[in-house]
Amino acid sequence: MAAYKIMIIEDDPLIRTELKHMLWGNGYDAVTVSDFSKTVKEVKKQAPHLILLDIRLPVADGFSLCSEIRTFSDIPIVFVTSSHTDMDELNSIMLGGDAYITKPYHTAILLAKIASLLKKAYPAGNQEVMPYQNTFLHLESGRLECNGRQVDLTKNELKILYYLYKNAGRICPRSDLIDFLWDNQLYVDDNTLSVNVNRIRDKLASIGLHDFIKTKHRQGYFI
Amino acid sequence: MNGKLYWKQKIPLLILNGTGMAALTVFLLLNGVNSDSLILILVVWEVILAGYLAGTYLLRKSQLDKLLGMAEQLEERYLLPEIMERPIWADDQVFYRLLKLSGKSMLEQTDKAKREAAEYREYIEQWIHEMKTPITAMKLICENRKSDFSKDLLVELEQANRYTEQALFYARSEHPEKDYFVREIRLFDVVHQAIGENRYLLRQSNVLIDLAETDDTVYSDEKWLCFILNQVIVNAVKYRAQAPVIQFYTEHAGNEVSLCIADNGIGIRAGDLPRIFEKGFTGENGRNTSQAATGMGLYLCKRLCDKLDIGITAASNGKTVFRLSFHINDFIHQVQS
């Protein structure tokens, strides 16, 4: 499946570049606008799946751009701005913005917003089952399947496995794993992570999967 | 009006009259006027003089009492010269003019000060928004290049952001009604947001988060509530003890729902408890920890809570518990359903 294309309309060049790298690093295709007199033309030409839109921009501000884009497209628009006033927030919703995020945002929160908006706007694209070797991770029902046998997973366990599946074959440092869980509003510490991983191992052993999650001493886990 | 002083000021007039009477008596006696007529003349003189003095005294007193009464009732007393009648006597008119002049110049001064304060506040708000751009850029740079080094920086960036937010909310807390956006919000959504804004600090301090998540909703302003939670979380981290834990849970009582934030930190001394929401109060803890307390955080919380009609209380009894109480507005629910 081709990556979603996200357009960044932001006047600070440094933030623009870093945002682009961040989106690339998370599996999105990112394009930017640098000539703000041709923003709308650029949107039509690039036809992105989602737009990140700053409010304070040279030439035309985010609000007028948003209403102009809305005349020909329904793509999700996320307002990203440093001014957190209620008028701005209200305006952005009235003019057809889909979300409103204030700077300095958490990349995790921004990514979560982007993912949920994309999922809503393009329902076909979401992946519900992740395969690895002879196992399947069912994200919707929260189960792991191996050779026809299934086991239920808790929220924590599912997220840990999801991260390991996504990075299959790579070592996942414990701190990255904890970061990922915090991104998903699961506030585990080092000990809890160990407990959770051990519990997963027990569960996997019960359906005949032994030594599935391996520990790399002092580095992290991998499958 | 001070009666004694008034009469003292009339002494020259009395002396003048006395002298006049004496001179007239001598003059009339020398011209052979009989004593009966003389007494009559002097009595008439005295009656007229007494009448005049009593009349002017009463008139004056009633005029001045009226002015005093007016000033008493007026909420903004500096406006008195604007509403008082123009006096009839020449010397009073001079004072009236002086009052008006000084009042006018004072109004100009206060207007100027007000304008300057408003301009300054505007500038501060502007400045804070501008500060957010570099903070965002630095955050992105750090998050794109994760390392131990960048994580330390991220903790500091969170702190920088917190201070700018505090300044913003201080500037806005004057007129919060301009910046309300009350709607139904899920309490734990705000909790997640507040934890997210402090995640690097919480991770660095090895704080365990214990959530008893519920779906309770309240009608309030999300960003103000998040700011209040931020302050409470930061305090819990600042005054933590061994194996720190912060718990979030809700409680129901009557038509109130409370969000409680409990920590197992060093606690607040009973003697300090009643004063922790005062501006600039740092207490025993604030003075003894390595990080200096400003006494601003909780003061702002209290101020915002008052404006938002949220009850905020603190208790410290083994655990330190901050409790935010919201009225459940049955009326809104009834209207909606």
Image: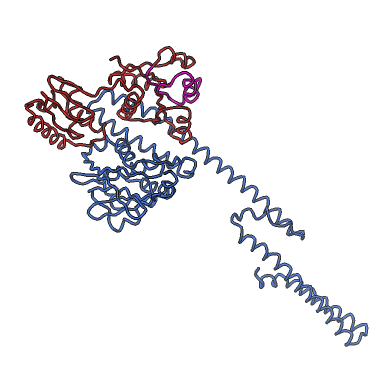
Chain colours: A red, B blue
* A7 relative to B78 in the view: left or right: left
* B260 relative to A83 in the view: left or right: left
Quadrant in the picture for residue B151: top left
Q: Is residue B135 above or below residue A72?
A: below
* A146 relative to A55 in the view: left or right: left
Q: In this view, does B94 lie above or below A58?
A: below
Asked if residue B180 lies in the magenta stretch, the reply is no
Q: Where is residue B223 in the image (x, y as percent from the top left)?
A: 39, 39
User: What are the residue bounds of the magenta stretch?
Assistant: A48-75
Looking at this view, is B332 or B113 the one in front? B332
Count every numbered label the image shows and give the total. 0
Asked if residue A57 lies in the magenta stretch, the reply is yes
Looking at this view, is B252 or B10 the one in front? B252
Q: Where is residue B86 in the image (x, y as percent from the top left)?
A: 74, 56
Q: Where is residue B169 in the image (x, y as percent from the top left)?
A: 42, 41
Looking at this view, is B93 or B170 the one in front? B170
| Outermost residue to the top | A45
Looking at this view, is B145 or B4 the one in front? B145
Looking at the image, which residue is at 23% across and 37% down? A187
Q: Position of residue B117 (x, y in %)?
A: 52, 41
Q: In this view, does A217 lie above or below B68?
A: above
